[in-house]
Amino acid sequence: MANDKPGRTVTVIGLGNMGSALAEALLSAGFSVTVWNRTASKVLPLLRLGAETARNAYEAVRASDISIVCVADFESTFSIIQDDAVIKELRGKTLAQLGVITADQSRQIASWASKRNINYLECSIMGLPNDVRNTTATPICSGSKETFDSNKDILMAFGAPEYVSVETGAAYNFDKSYYLFGYAVVQGFVQGAALAYASGFPIETY
């Protein structure tokens, strides 16, 4: 797909189910996208869609002013970004964490990034990979408002982004709060339905 957003190149590191969806959504939105994954075969479908590939994480972060990391866990994230060459290329740029980590782990990355002049943005994706592809997910973000605003156009490729706090960790805690509320609602509905059934009136009435 031709890039219709000149000057906006985005790197996606980690091409699991969600990472691949993020890259596809960015390509569909017209961004130039560079991808890298430790398992090289996962890059191939995205190359056919127009993505560029990097031979390593250093080349990946060098290609863009914003690098989205969406890997399996906190340890995998740190093993990638702590490389000296990667750190050098990230200075003055934005590192966006869209993987599944905890609020405390996100704060650790933010502290690490701040000491190295790396802009850090955390986003918790509320939605499934297909929601991202269909631009119907909700990226919940926290960190620097300036960094959020300057990259909002990129986040909009996934859906309607929401900024919740300058405090790092807030996005991940918001995610947990939302789902706790959702689980409570579902549990209450099921219990009410069971009572309705036991009382002999139609579920439609309930």
Image (cartoon, rainbow, N blue to C red):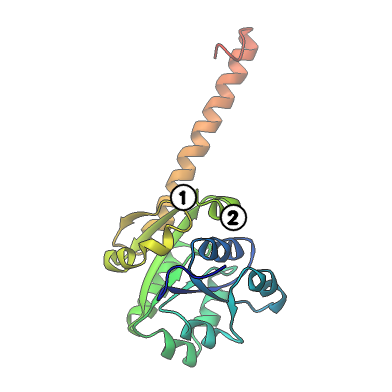
Kindly identify the residue that appears in the image at 55 percent across and 81 percent down: 79
Q: Position of residue 42 (x, y in %)?
A: 69, 72
As shown in the figure, which amino acid type bears the numbered disc 2?
A: Pro
For residue 106, which quarter of the picture?
bottom left
Horizontally, residue 110 falls left or right of residue 61, namely: left
| Distance from the alpha carbon under mark 2 to that under mark 1 | 18 Å
Which part of the image, by quadrant, shows the C terminus?
top right
- Which quadrant holds the N terminus? bottom right
Q: Where 44 sits versus 191, above or below?
A: below
Q: Which residue is mark 1?
A: 176
Mark 1 belongs to which amino acid? Lys
**Where is residue 33 shown, x and y percent of the image?**
52, 73
Mark 1: secondary structure: helix
Q: Secondary structure at mark 2?
A: helix
Question: At x 40% / y 78%, what residue is drawn?
Answer: 65
| Residue receiving disc 2 | 129
